[in-house]
Amino acid sequence: MSRKGWGIVIGLSAAFITGPVSSATNAAPIPDFSGIWGRTSVDFEPPPSGAGPVMNKTRTFYMRIGDDANPILKPQAAEKVREAGAISRTGVNFPTPSNSCTPWSPPYAWRALQMQILQQKDQVILLYVGDQQIRHVRLNQPHPANVTPSWGGDSIGHYEGDTLVIDTVGVKAGPLSMIDNYATPYSAALHLVERIRLMDGDVANAAAEQAERDSGRVDVEMGGATINPAYKGKGLQVQFRVEDAGMFTRPWSAAVTLRRAVGPWEERVCADSRFNYITGKPFPLPQDTRPDF
């Protein structure tokens, strides 16, 4: 399939907006991204040409082995991808933010299988299913001179016609921080630019189907969104560009396509468990053999 979805790309949601609102940049109506959007794959979609994301060698959600030979990776980043793939080959899940109950930094957060966007006058709020992850995007404001690193980073945005553009810096790096589902790391130098807008529904369906072929389908029983096959309206796509000289040899781009999800907004709460994702074995929790009363 030609990835022409990139030519029509991107969109997100609007709540708290009851009618057309003028954009601060060109007085055009602000697009309405309201509703629940869903996915049936968790990986990033590569661009039609140029440097793209690490992809799954196995093309299935249930065995995650990233392509450590992707030329975007510096040696230390490629090693992290190899280490994670080696764990996957044993049949064990390697630690990720989603299975270890740690924050989902952008762009990792786009692995979410359901999401919503709330559009307000001075900010946009992105809600991701998966421990109820939340991002706040300040509109029409600059980054502070000295950004305090945080898991969500400092995100500022503005509208360019039908597109919401989000610029993020200051994303905190830690032991489990990663870009994607293959443990691809990032450094404190990460600079992320996301462009979100509505797209033609047929193009969205084709892009989503291609994503399933490239990276595997996530069944509803495993958390995949239920997509309404009869829906004929717009889809939503996020195109983003990653720059990080600490971990990557060059800037690279990817996309995420979402469609209308059926059903209520789900509450999925990650809880600490007794399972060690590195060894594949349970570990004991502290116990008291005598009651306190």
Image (cartoon, helix red, strand yellow):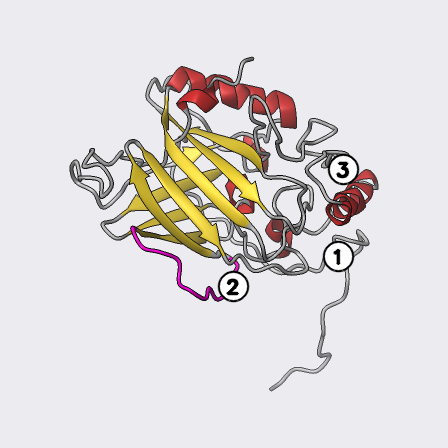
Q: Choose between 164 and 205: the one closer to the eye.
A: 164
Q: Is residue 105 visible?
A: yes
Q: For the view shown, which residue lies furthest in the left direction?
A: 19
Residue designated by label 2: 149
Disc 3 target residue: 68
Residue 31, image x and y in percent? 27, 34
Marks 3/1: CA–CA distance = 24 Å
Q: Secondary structure at mark 3?
A: loop
Looking at this view, name the residue that lies furthest to the top: 1
**Majority secondary structure in the magenta region:** loop
Closer mark to the observer between disc 2 and disc 1: 2
Q: Label 2 sits on what residue type?
A: Pro
Q: Residue at x 57, y 20 (%)?
A: 210
Region in magenta: 140-151
Give the mark nearer the N terminus: 2 vs 1.
2
Q: Could you tell me if the residues under marks 3 and 1 are in contact, i.e. CB atoms within 8 Å? A: no
